[in-house]
Amino acid sequence: MLLKGGTMINPVSVLSDPKNRSFYCSLFIVASLITGAYFIGGVSIAKEYKEKLTRWKVTYTMQNTNLDTCKKRCQPSGTEALPEGIVAKTSDFEIRPLWGTSKKDKNSTPSKSLLAIAVGIKQKEIVDKIVRKFLSSDFVVMLFHYDGAVDKWRDLHWSDTAIHVSVMNQTKWWFAKRFLHPDIVTEYKHIFLWDEDLGVESFDPERYLSIIQDEGLEISQPALDPVKSEVYHPITARVKKSKVHSVINDISSQNDLVHAWGLDEQLGYCAQGDRMKNVGVVDSEYIVHLGLPTLGVTDDNKASIMALCLLMRIFCLSLAQGINNMVQSQKEDSKALAPSGPHIPSDRAKVRMQSFIDMRIFKERWRNAVKEDNCWVDPY
């Protein structure tokens, strides 16, 4: 008996009524369905949650596993938010058309050799001869204009295919440090950084490349004809009947790179491997250094300028070696070379003096860098 609202209810009589029995049966069925759905749904949710937990665990494990690897990835500053593969680490100097494909054959590969020269319009004829030799060997040509006269080169048939960079009164090494970036030039197997006053009648680029590859030379230069060259160093002078000779044995006294004095003394450190074997001068493919004064020249009196240059070179060498008594005697010898007549002013001597100052600064920087780098060990 059930008591509800003060009324006694007999469950037997309630269930004996067909209508009530049908209602309670329906209620039971609905309750059963709800309970079954809840049970099945609970099992499904639990399974899905378990799967999510597993995925999260795997992701977390992968992230932790790759954490050290990702930290070791060396990405350029500012590209950390980008996927690594979208950023090209290198490029080249190949000229691209504004539309369509390149003029070169689609199957051809980009040139792997680069010629870069600092030029002035006065040496246009000489530079033209140099460039035409290198173009025949499929070189990319880059001209650094220190006099701003870029348009005056447009009449040469190869001018539009060359790369022109123009900045007033700068040296080839100034240009090289700023426009021959490692990310660009790393694509090139051979890089020639030349002066503009070189005679190339006895030089063939393809034969030269073949020789340095056979000899395993990482850093090299063509020998200078000691008879025809106005300026050369004994180390770089051509040795007759020789194919290649080493320069490292006597490199401590060499300052042959104009406007980069002292730099060539350390080039051996850039060679891959043994610099006694990988740095050399190629005698069988030689050139002539005409020794034409360029930067700082304001007159056409070559003899007068050459005398000034000789005086400055002797003066700088005397200071570098600490031989004070050499200055006066060498000056007297040099004065004999100077022509008689009125003096024509030139800033060439000032340029040479600045080269010597730069050399001293570079050497001091090298000494300080060696002293401060506790991890560096001189391999030589």
Image (spheres, rainbow, N blue to C red):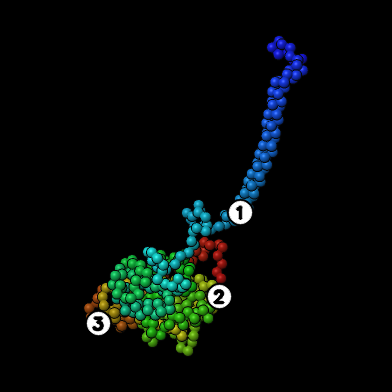
Residue 166 picture quarter:
bottom left
Q: Nearer the viewer, residue 331 or 282?
A: 282
Which amino acid lies under the numbered mark 2 shown in the image of this protein? Asp
The kind of secondary structure element at disc 2 is loop
Residue under label 3, please give it: 340
- At horizontal 39% and vertical 80% (from top left) the residue drawn is 133
Callout 2 environment at 10 Å: few (<14), some (14 to 19), or many (20+)?
Answer: some
| Mark 1, residue position | 66
Whole-Å distance between the Cαs marked 1 and 2? 38 Å
Q: Amino acid at mark 3?
A: Ser
Q: Which residue is mark 2?
A: 274
| In the image, farthest residue toward the front | 18
Q: Pick whichever, 220 or 94, lies toward us.
A: 94
The nearer-to-camera label among 1 and 2 is: 1
| Sequence-first disc among 1 and 3 | 1
**Rendered position, 26 above or below 98:** above
Q: Amino acid at mark 1?
A: Asn
Which quarter of the image is occupied by the C terminus? bottom right
Mark 3 lies on a secondary structure that is loop
Q: Check disc 1 and report its element: helix, strand or loop.
A: helix
Outermost residue, left side = 342
Residue 353: tell me if it is visible: no
Q: Position of residue 226 (x, y in %)?
A: 40, 85
Earlier in the chain: of badge 2 and badge 3, it is 2
Name the side, left or right, on which 109 lies relative to 156.
Answer: right
Q: Residue at x 74, y 14 (%)?
A: 9
Kindly report the distance in space between the C-alpha atoms of the residues bearing marks 1 and 3.
Answer: 78 Å
Who comes first in sequence, dot 1 or dot 2?
1
Residue 12, located in which quarter of the rendered image? top right
**Furthest residue in direction top, as rendered:** 6
Mark 2 or mark 3, which is nearer to you? 2
